[in-house]
Image (spheres, helix red, strand yellow):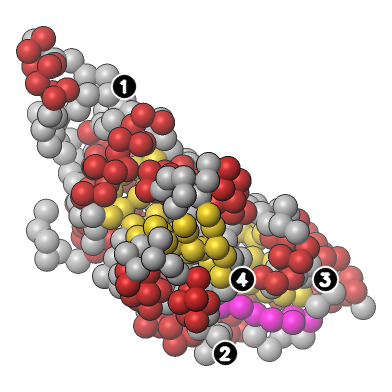
Amino acid sequence: MDDDWNARTKAVHGGIRRSQYGELSEAIFLTQGFVYDSAEAAEARFVSAGEDEFIYARYGNPTVRMFEERIAAIEGAEDAFATASGMAAVNGALSALLKAGDHVVAARALFGSCLYVLEDVLGRYGVEITFVDGTDLEQWRAALRPDTRAVFFESVSNPTLEVIDIAAVSALAHAVGATVVVDNVFATPVFSDAIAQGADVVVYSATKHIDGQGRTLGGVILGRREFIRKTLEPYMKHTGGAMSPFTAWVMLKGLETMDLRVRAQAASALAIAETFQAEAGLERVIYPGLANHAQHDLCTAQMGQGGTVLALDLAGGKPAAFAFLNALRIAAISNNLGDAKTIVTHPATTTHQRLPDADKQRLGITPGLVRLSVGIEDRADLIGDIRQALDVARGNIA
């Protein structure tokens, strides 16, 4: 692979390993173990495995390695480790890095499972967590300490779509020697430049835009080779969070079309946001690509586009939101995002249900808030579907 290839080309050809048969489509090496020519060869591999030598699928696999090399090339990272799910990636990146007594500063606006890892898992083992408003640089500055080991945040928060300044937070964190870990799923690898902007470790749920078709769970952790192979890999291979070869093959196929899908989805998301931003019956339309978004300029500089997800806050609260969801004909009610199909979610009663009401209120997760992950369907059809569902919702509360 040529380093000067553009991302869309890397997404098709990066990391290719062909067998002696010269297959065009990547091979699935569906094996958990590998055979050695001799006892001496086995001993040598366990001492120091070469670049294209494998021991056990929990440690590495040729198909998985193709996926890791391809996504690393797209992201501009030195290396990557593929995981069984997005949350395995979040947990692995943080747990491999931290120990009892360490201090972490994290943005308060996080997915519920991320909060669980920080508060319940890491907190249980003696890691101190300080939460801040991720958009407030003064809060980051005040919370960071000489013993801060890491900072963690979603570059675009779920579900209220706050955009955090990666470069500014990274500069503050690096000044005290902290490692910057960014969950970048809403930015997608297509719009991401997180490593160039200062992130040390980037985490994705590959379940979302990378697969993009609702087939498999997966995740990936990207960063410097020293971190991936010396710090992360020992933790992951001994705790069992590795990606399966079949999943890696599905993800490789997803990467081939990811750029095309995500750009089309983002264009439709912007069109939908612009169409409905002044609609009667909506308290708010939240989309970083809109000029009225609080971090619009930052989003434009950091991502280039607003992404594939928007949020609609319906007047009338939960009854209006439920009436809207139930009236949609194209969009599917589900809790995933980044899919080729448009997906609609009511965060307050599903993905963020377990958050205390005070935390929901503080984060802007109102009873009327609906998260819309825009798919690749015809844009006019999606707009028409949303319009008729809003009409039903308005009639429900009239």
The residue range painted magenta reads 281-289
Image depth: mark 3 or mark 4 in front: 4
Residue at which label 4 appears: 160
Report whether 206 appears left or right of 160.
Answer: left
User: What's the amino acid at mark 1?
Assistant: Gln
How much space separates mark 2 and mark 1, taking CA atoms? 52 Å
**Which three-letter amino acid code belongs to the residue tagged 2?**
Asn
Q: Looking at the image, is mark 2 or mark 1 earlier in the sequence?
A: 1
Name which residue lies at 11% across and 9% down.
Answer: 39
Q: How far apart are the alpha carbons under marks 3 and 1?
A: 50 Å
For the residues labelled 4 and 2, the Cα–Cα distance comes to: 14 Å
Q: Earlier in the sequence, mark 3 or mark 1?
A: 1
Residue designated by label 1:
32
Label 1 sits on a secondary structure element that is: loop
Mark positioned earlier in the residue sequence (4 or 2):
4
Which numbered dot is residue 292? Answer: 2
Labels 4 and 1 touching (C-beta < 8 A): no
**Residue 44 percent coordinates (x, y):** 9, 21
Q: Amino acid at mark 4?
A: Thr
Image quadrant in which you'd find residue 2: bottom left
Asked whether 282 falls inside the magenta stretch, the response is yes
